[in-house]
């Protein structure tokens, strides 16, 4: 008798290999491009103040504490990459614009997530920081080293230094970046605390977990 997971089993061949992303929820907000441009201007003032503060702190001798996780991370991976620092700063700019619009229009978490995601920063001062869309040609013989143009219709899908696609909307407490909170409104335990407690647990439930489930728990 063939295994239910064998290639010969017809049910195995019916597994759909083409992933169809779920429809993303959306909300209409009374925000136009002029309001976004004003938000960009206010955000850039905050960014300059942030960079100035960072420079002052470094000038005053503020660094990572010896043997802290930050210092160990830097010792392992070496000095920061200038290109990645620029990407992080550009992402921080977009995040600050989102936060400013949320405060300006008193938006709730769902409005922040499903409403502001409908807008972009093109045709603003921050357009220069948006990811450039690569030019692709179907005549290219080899794939690109950074993953761009693997999909000619969606050139940046799978490209390095780009965001992942989500199967479901995020569940940030403020809708955009803050950690999810418990049903009582309090903070949830840290992932490291959970993994440590489960690892040390002597419960029968933990003993029944297969290595496959355990591996996925620690990875995600």
Image (spheres, grey):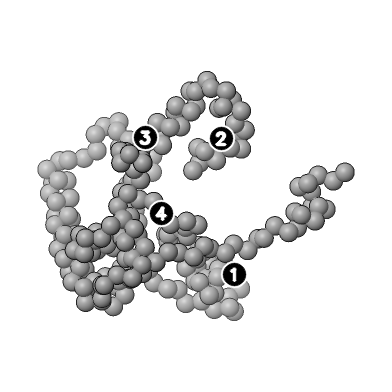
Q: CA distance from mark 3 to mark 2?
A: 19 Å
Q: CA distance from mark 3 to mark 4?
A: 18 Å
Q: CA distance from mark 2 to mark 4?
A: 23 Å
The reply to whether discs 3 and 2 touch (Cβ–Cβ < 8 Å) is no
Which label sits in the foreground, 3 or 2?
A: 3
Which label sits in the foreground, 3 or 1?
A: 3
> Where residue 189 is drawn, which disc sits there?
3
**Residue 218: where, in percent of width, then height?**
50, 37
91 or 206: nearer the viewer: 206
Q: Crowding near pointer 2: few (<14 within 10 Å), some, many (20+)?
A: some
**Tag 3's secondary structure?**
loop
Rendered residue at 53%/22% (across/down): 203
> Where residue 214 is drawn, which disc sits there?
2
Q: Which residue is mark 4?
A: 170
> Where residue 142 is drawn, which disc sits there?
1
Q: CA distance from mark 1 to mark 4?
A: 35 Å
Q: Is the N terminus in the top left, top right, bottom left or bottom right quadrant?
A: top right
Q: Crowding near pointer 3: few (<14 within 10 Å), some, many (20+)?
A: few
Mark 3 vs 1, N-terminal side: 1
């Amino acid at each position: 008798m063939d295994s239910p997971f064998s290639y010969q089993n017809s049910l195995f061949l019916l597994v759909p290999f083409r992933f169809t992303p779920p429809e993303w929820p959306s909300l209409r907000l009374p925000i136009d491009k002029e309001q976004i441009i004003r938000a960009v201007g206010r955000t850039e003032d905050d960014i300059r103040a942030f960079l100035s503060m960072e420079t002052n702190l470094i000038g005053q001798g503020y660094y990572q504490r010896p043997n802290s996780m930050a210092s160990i991370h830097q010792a392992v991976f070496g000095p920061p990459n200038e290109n990645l620092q620029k990407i992080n700063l550009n992402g921080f700019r977009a995040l600050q614009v989102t936060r400013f619009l949320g405060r300006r229009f008193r938006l709730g978490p769902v409005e922040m997530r499903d409403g502001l995601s409908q807008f972009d920063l093109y045709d603003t001062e921050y357009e220069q920081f948006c990811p450039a869309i690569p030019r692709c040609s179907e005549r290219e013989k080899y794939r690109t080293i950074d993953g761009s143009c693997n999909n000619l219709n969606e050139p940046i899908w799978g490209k390095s230094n780009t965001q992942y696609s989500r199967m479901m909307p995020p569940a940030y407490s403020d809708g955009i970046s803050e950690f999810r909170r418990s049903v009582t409104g309090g903070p949830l335990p840290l992932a490291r605390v959970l993994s440590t407690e489960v690892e040390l647990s002597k419960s029968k439930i933990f003993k029944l977990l297969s290595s496959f489930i355990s591996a996925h728990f620690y990875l995600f």
